[in-house]
Amino acid sequence: MSGHTGPTLNKAVNGVEMSNLTLVAILLMIMAVAYQLGLTKSRAIEKGTVARMHSRPGYYGMLTALWCGVPAFLIFAIWSLIEPTVIRSLVIAEIVPHVGELSSQQIAVQMRRIENVASGFAATASVQDYEIIAAERLTRLQAIGSLAMIGAMAAVAMAALVLVRRRIHPNMRARNAVETFTLIVLMMCSAVAVMTTIGIVLSMLGESLRFFEVVSPIDFFFGTTWNPAFSTTSPDRLGDFGLLPLLWGTLMVTVIALLIAIPVGLMTAIYMAEYAPSWVRSSAKPVIEVLAGIPTIVYGVFALMIVGPFFADLGETFGITIRATSALTAGVVMGIMIIPFISSLADDVITQVPRAMRDGSLGLGATKSETIRKVVLPAALPGIVGAFLLATSRAVGETMIVLLAAGNSPSLHANPFEAVSTVTVSIVNQLTGDQDFASAQSLVAFALGLTLFVITLILNVIALIIVRKYREQYE
Amino acid sequence: MPIGRLSSAEVEARVVRSLKKRHIKEKAFRAVGLSGVVTGLVLVLILFTSILSRGLPAFWQATFELDVYFNPEIIRIDPRPTQTSGESSGDFRERELAWLTQVNMVNWNRLLEDSVIAAAPEAAAMARRDVRRLITSGERFQLREMVAENPSIIGETRRLRLLADANVDVWLRGNIDRSLPDAQQQLSRATRDLADKLFEEGIIKIRFSQALFMNPDSRSSLASAGLAGAFVGSLFMMLIVMFLAVPVGVASAIYLEEFAPKNKLTDLIEVNINNLAAVPSIVFGLLGAAIFINTFNLPMSTPIVGGLVLSLMTLPTVIIATRSALKAVPPSIRQAALGVGASRVQTVFGHVLPLAIPGILTGAILGVAQALGETAPLLLIGMNAFVTNIASTPFEQSAALPVQIYLWQGNELRNFFEARTSAAIIVLLALMISLNAFAIWLRKKFERRW
């Protein structure tokens, strides 16, 4: 008997269950038809009466299509979200008398088996009788479910089509309705960015709180050792989660990066904005900005393969021990990465200083460099500081360069030639090294992420306020 | 000393005296500025030359051209089973699997060893293990696939291109110090000598590496590791970013720029978007791990999750670019449209948006390019998993280009993978530069000055 069940069930499934993509395509086609129906109806009315239609015919068509398609689509979306859970619980209820209560993992395994039986892809020898019954029930439920869904969608679409089409009338404000719908869609899209921020804050806070249930915040924020144990190898020991060595490493790398990037970036910006002939500006600027577009993983590999060994050799010739992966390597390469960031932001700020200020200074007999140093730069200072802060925030949050080139050794020392570890590196290590998501070893990544988010948020907000104030000053 | 007490002649003399010094200072300042630019340019040059010089050779690799005899003595298998009527798919699948297992059990390595010996008879005296090490282990699967697909070739001889082992490649190109003692060499002395001889005879040649582009990653057969899986994964993610981040970003920019009332709330949204653009990318990875994987139970290491995370990350970039493109459309266009009686929605969609499209596209392409190169968030959603198949849907596990670079740079066989890593970087950079060039071309072509 079981030999025949497979194919028969298969046919039943294929007959009813349409792929979701086809369904959406059909819905779109129905909407196109609805548009056409609304359009012709409104044109007919326009011809038949002396009254002028409120809106152009296209809007009546669009309104009909929207009423026809949107509710049906909502039904489709909600139904596909809920249906699998409902069917699953019904099928599981079917087999509980045979196998007893199941854990969620067992349920998943059992469902997989039943689905295999239903699709005819199970080896028949090992199939239990109750599984066949459950599979038949599953198929029947799925068939009923998709039939009901398509029925509901069709009914709603048809009802909307008929109702709206009947209501088309010269006084009907079709354009206003369509425009309101457009605005609502636009508004919902702009809510996504806000929801992202809320999502970031909530998820970080939630997971961090779970972490702080296990490790006290004092140990985390003021601890001086970072040495988390692996939950798989030593389940009874947590290890130390002191943030300070990581913050120290981050600080060290960031400072080295800024020591490289600020002078070079600022010098470039001054030259580009004040001295460079236009051909230099138009050709050299994009080349330097190429540096900003290079993915950070490339910088990381560059640091690891070329810059690190170079520094190690250099140290050897001078008799200093420089490790190939060190705060210095990571900092220098990160500095290179930030140069175009600082130079283009500072360039914008410097060119925004009004012409009149320069002319005034030059008119009094100051040389160009005196004008720049004593007039332009002081005037542009707030904006430049804003650029530095944004660059700092980027350096603090940078991951791949430090992951590859900083050496990952979380300890409190002041030697830039030694390896360090940073907040971002530890996030990656904790979340990729440990598979158990609910362990303190993984959750600490979120506490680190929250710290990082807050630090960069403060830097960004201060920088944005400064830059904005500065812009208003000269606009 | 106050200048007021000096006569004008004295002042002039003082100014003239200081002039020379001031002009030298001027020149020095200018030179310092120029040195900043030169430093930047030199750094670009160093970065590109070092990556190109290391990566370009990896586009070619040592490859055998061998006559392989599909010896029926070695390949002893039953005919391929066919589905009989009345047999369930499950049962047939089981029989088929049994047959494939049988095909799998064939000693394919022996076929390869025999073909090497046929080409170089002195290899017959060597240990089989030393001969086998010449050809990368993944190539035996090529023979297996050929037979499984078409069993009738058993008994025939075919000329095949087979990749040499990664260590052979390293040895032949001198990427390892040839004077190192035997103990430190990866290959035995006999294998090395045989490789040199085959290379001289032209049986092994350095050929363009198709494997780099056609194969997915591999850990057991290092020489055949390629970028195809990572490329497809990145492609899926790009498509998701294009179809999610770009429309949503453009729509929200239109709302904020053209329709939103100017009040505290929209001000807050604006600050929020600017800030979101500066949030470290790794934070988006954490968001993805917590929300998409932990809460919504989406599968790890899949392009769909990666695409969603990258979309959220790219969204602020697209919004900011679109807003500035909309801002650049002069108000007179809006006033003219409103003046002849168009509604605000008609004005925006009929007149402002078409004029802003080049700017929007440029911003969108740059956003997509930025997403293409992002690594850190993908590590947190498990895309650093070792995946050997090429994903056919975004819901399957997959690698991604930047993560593939990360994985390869960590491989133990440094001599081989340093070049491969650089080659992967060249591929990634080439993709990004062509995207950027396309954006610049768009901007140049459609740029309009008002």
Image: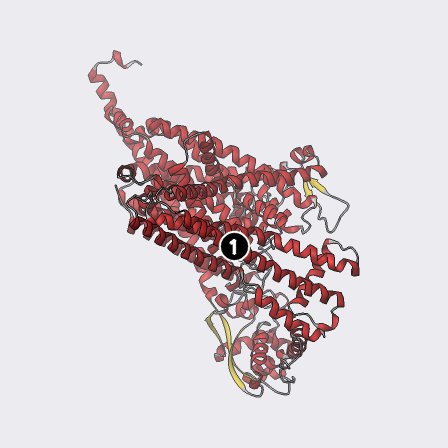
| Residue that appears at 67% across and 50% down | A434
Q: Is residue B330 above or below residue B71?
A: above
In percent of width and height, residue A373 lies at: 34, 29
Q: Residue lying furthest top in this view?
A: B5
Q: Nearer the viewer, residue A97 or B406?
A: A97
Q: Is residue A196 above or below residue A384?
A: below
Q: Is residue A146 above or below residue B141?
A: above
Which quadrant of the figure has residue A267? top left
Question: Which image quadrant: the N terminus of chain A?
Answer: bottom right
Mark 1 = which residue?
Answer: A155
Which quadrant of the figure has residue B331? top left
Q: Secondary structure at mark 1?
A: helix
Question: Which image quadrant: the C terminus of chain A?
Answer: top left
Going by the numbered disc 1, the residue's amino acid type is: Ala
Asked if residue A323 can be seen in this view, the reply is no
With A133 as the anchor, is A362 left or right in this view? Answer: left
Q: Residue lying furthest left in this view?
A: B9
In the rendered structure, the residue with mark 1 lies on which chain?
A
| Residue that appears at 48% across and 54% down | A158
With B96 as the anchor, is A182 left or right in this view? Answer: left
In percent of width and height, residue B431 lies at: 42, 57
In percent of width and height, residue A314 lies at: 51, 48
In percent of width and height, residue A257 lies at: 49, 40
With A338 as the anchor, is A402 left or right in this view? Answer: right
With A83 as the anchor, is B46 left or right in this view? Answer: left
How many residues crowd mark 1 within 10 Å: few (<14), some (14–19), many (20+)? some
Q: Is residue A28 above or below residue B138?
A: above
